[in-house]
Amino acid sequence: MSNFIEQPRYSCALGAQQTVVAIKRAVPIVHAGPGCSGKISSLIGQGEGYAGGNTIPCTNASETEIVYGGEQRLKSIIEGSFKVIDADLYVVLTGCTSDIVGDDIGRVASEFQEAGKPIVYAETGGFKSNNYVSHEVVVNAIIDQYSDKYAAKGAKTKGLVNVFSAIPYQDPYWNGNLEEIKRILEGIGLKVNILFGHHSGGVEEWKTVPAAEFNIVASAWAGLGIAVHLEEKYGTPFLHFPYLPIGGTETTKFLRQVADFGKLDKTTAEAFIKKEEERFYAQIERTADFMLEFRYGIPRRFYTLLDASYAIGFSKFLLNELGIIPAKQFITDDTPESFREAVSKYFTNISEFRSAEVSFSIDGGAIQEEIRRDNHKNRALILGSSWERDIAKDIGADLLIISPPVSYRLVLSCGYAGYNGGLRAIEDIYDRVLDTYR
Amino acid sequence: MSIVNLKEPEVVIREIRLGSITGFEGTAGELVQCSRAGKLKDNIRSFSQCMGCSSGNALCQLAMIQDAAIINHAPAGCAGDFFVFNFVYRVGQMERKLPAVNGRYFSTNIEERDTIFGAVQKLESTIREVYERLHPNAIFITTSCASGIIGDDVEGVANDLCNELGIPVVACFCEGFKSRIWTTGFDSAYHSIVRKIVKPPEKKTNKVNIINFWGSHVFDTLLNRLGYEAEYIVPFSTVAQLERISEAAATIQICPTLGTYIGAALEQVYGVPEIKSPPAYGIAGTDIWMRELGKVLDREAEIEEIIKEEHIRVIPQIEEYRKQLKGKTAYLTAGAAHGHSLIALLRELGLEVQGAAIFHHDPIYDNGDTASDALAHDVKTYGDIANYNVCNKQAYELVNILNKVKPDIMIARHGGMTLWGAKLGVPTLLIGDEQFSFGYQGILNYAERILETLDNKEFVTNLAKHSSMPYTKWWLAQNPFAFLGGDTSVEFY
């Protein structure tokens, strides 16, 4: 049976090297063929970061390592990494070559762990899964082999939460999204381990993962396995908010759920929500006349070709806050079977008045053919990837690139989550719309 | 000379075919001498950073054949470079006034169960569905580490489906682990093209094959004046065009590392003569190249005329540039052999080349002719180059060297390297288009860009002030080649 991919939008299991790159002063050590790491960086890695891209140590496995095993080579590269790369955490990740020939990397890495080195390992042979799944594998490995060493038995820090949401680099806007999620959670009175990116506390933050009072998963399915693992390991309860909250309504809903779940001080939380909503809706109100009156056509229906978290988040936002109606929605993250029904349900109940059709597909070529066959009487908005440039042009649609590959955008701190992300989304969408007029 | 064997599905890797290496420390002269004496021995690093692999380089040549589809028989991650080449393809479409299309690239998405039961059926059904979807004029299958190790019979599938569908279905073997030299991927792509696409000549034409990436069409004027026509291959060709490259009057390489295999294959199998000389960079190099071209195309008198005209036109301008660049120092990092060409250019312009980190070294090319050796030409024409390092994209060595050498300008000819010059406050130049600096006019083009870069210090100065450095202080104080070779394995601390 074939389940081929035209126009890939995510990577393989080894793609979780980007999860490591996103941790402040952490470096992956890749035990794989010579080209793997670079191919991952080119799909989901705009910019090297601290020690990503061409800096990543790699065994560059050759015929020798396939025939005789690569454990010796790996050991030598790990030794070199400690000497050459100035990092706080080293994470050994395997590729197809190592996992097929069966190198015992645990044995190699544990020698260094026993010597007290900050090193973690995980098996991420490309064929094992995609990077949505292996993100969980790698985070859990760091928790088990690193954070756990700093776990004080049963001691919890009041008000401290771990957040598992945007997957670094697979979500091109992860940095901005996580920054906003941290900001709003702090706003309602929490201390936040955001774990990745510039706004995190680096490895010091990872040390306090076991001490969190509860965990928050803001994602359809990817990342849920981490929270389940932490619950089993440390008894930490978790809240699952099953999509990325975008804009006023959804962000408020998210914050209220968190406040309820964590039994936070209601007054503090509601005061923050009120202030943020006022700010958000003041802007919406300011531009409502534009959206209602602009006579030359703005998008009236939208397609998404996104992962489940973004697809649900954006669909709710576009419909409820901007009045753009969902056309067919395509989920491109190879959502595991066990989550598909739940994801579909969110589209069935996309608003009080409406449901949206949804399908799961990893074949971008087939999705585009399906969109092409639709009736394009009115203007559409496509939320997708760089692969959608031509289809957007052909059907007269506006394109906002949210998914990898993002080659036509340069992403710095832009994010679409939360109140600020909602406003940014509106600016970006109508910027593209207005830019089409001469 | 290596023997091109089209009966074999796989091309022999460069390490074995040409004796190519990825580790060397010394002077360029020493390297050339060792190469000639057959004394070249590869050095392995005990610490290394990620490189590139053959599959990327194979795709780079196949991805822009306008009416072919590519199937990467691999896990999804190997397809990470699809959009890199799609982007290049689409920019090239704009430049060539072709309609906008996406490249049609597919991953068979090898998964865990496939590594146990094999992925042959998956490959077959993907080929059939791709054919149904697109009706391409050819389908290329690029292999991967996973497909190679599990032992899928890709050649068998390709042959069966070729018969079934009635179009060339071509296996291109480019498993990353097979070679440390990622340019082997070029050879893989060319081998599959010459083996399964190119047809025996029916006539001779006045076309000249230009083996290139997707650079500017600088050969048109020259060749037209000589009564010939440039045929830029392989990117932006059609399958029908490639079928006929055996009928060309000659083959030009813009870089022998790129085209060594296909140049030799077309000459050996179909008698298309290859222009054997260093590529035309710098005055002396361009003179040699022009004369060789004149000889092969039987246009010697016309060529002498052009050389004379061009000397009169460019030499006084070059003199001006030399005055401005006097005393300036440069450090270079690039692939072979374009790196050799850039050394010629830099020295032609009077810059002092303090050293070079070149990604690999081919002691000889497939044509077996030392006339194509651009590094030997550099040494002979401009003198030896100290600190000549063969280093397959190892940024840690480069940073160490730059930190000590501190040149006035760093020249890079590969992504991922420029950052290190800039972070140290060194103005850094990367020119993507190989043809930009080709020939007489190219020297002037290049000189202008160097002056511009030297002049633009604000950005790098500011960046250096605010940059972090992921390398340890210990490392920056070491010999840059401390991890190269067997006897320097450092003890664990």
Image (cartoon, rainbow, N blue to C red):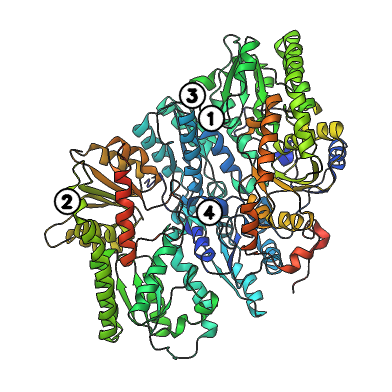
Asked if residue B5 is positioned above or below residue B200 in the image, the reply reads below
Q: Are marks 1 and 4 on the same chain?
A: no
Q: Which mark is residue B238?
A: 3
What subunit carries mark 3?
B
Q: Nearer the viewer, mark 1 or mark 2?
A: 2
| Disc 3 with disc 1 on a shared chain | yes
Q: In 3D space, how far apart are the residues under numbered discs 3 and 1 (Cα atoms)?
A: 9 Å
In the picture provided, is B396 more to the left or to the right than A182? right
Measure how far apart labels 4 and 3 are at the Cα level. Answer: 30 Å
> Circle 3 sits in a helix, a strand or a loop, which is it?
loop
Of residues B80 and B5, which is closer to you in this image?
Answer: B80
User: What is the secondary structure assignment of the residue under circle 1?
Assistant: loop
At label 1, the amino acid type is Pro
Q: Nearer the viewer, residue B482 or A233?
A: B482
Q: Quadrant of the N terminus of chain B?
A: top right
Q: Residues within 10 Å of mark 2 (few under 14, many from 20)?
A: few
For disc 1, the marked residue is B235
- In what element is the residue under mark 2? helix
Q: Quick check: marks 4 and 3 in contact, CB under 8 Å?
A: no
Tell me the residue at 70%/17% (across/down). Answer: B273
Query: Mark 4, chain letter?
Result: A
Q: Are marks 2 and 3 on the same chain?
A: no
Which residue is under mark 2? A292
Q: Which mark is residue A41?
A: 4
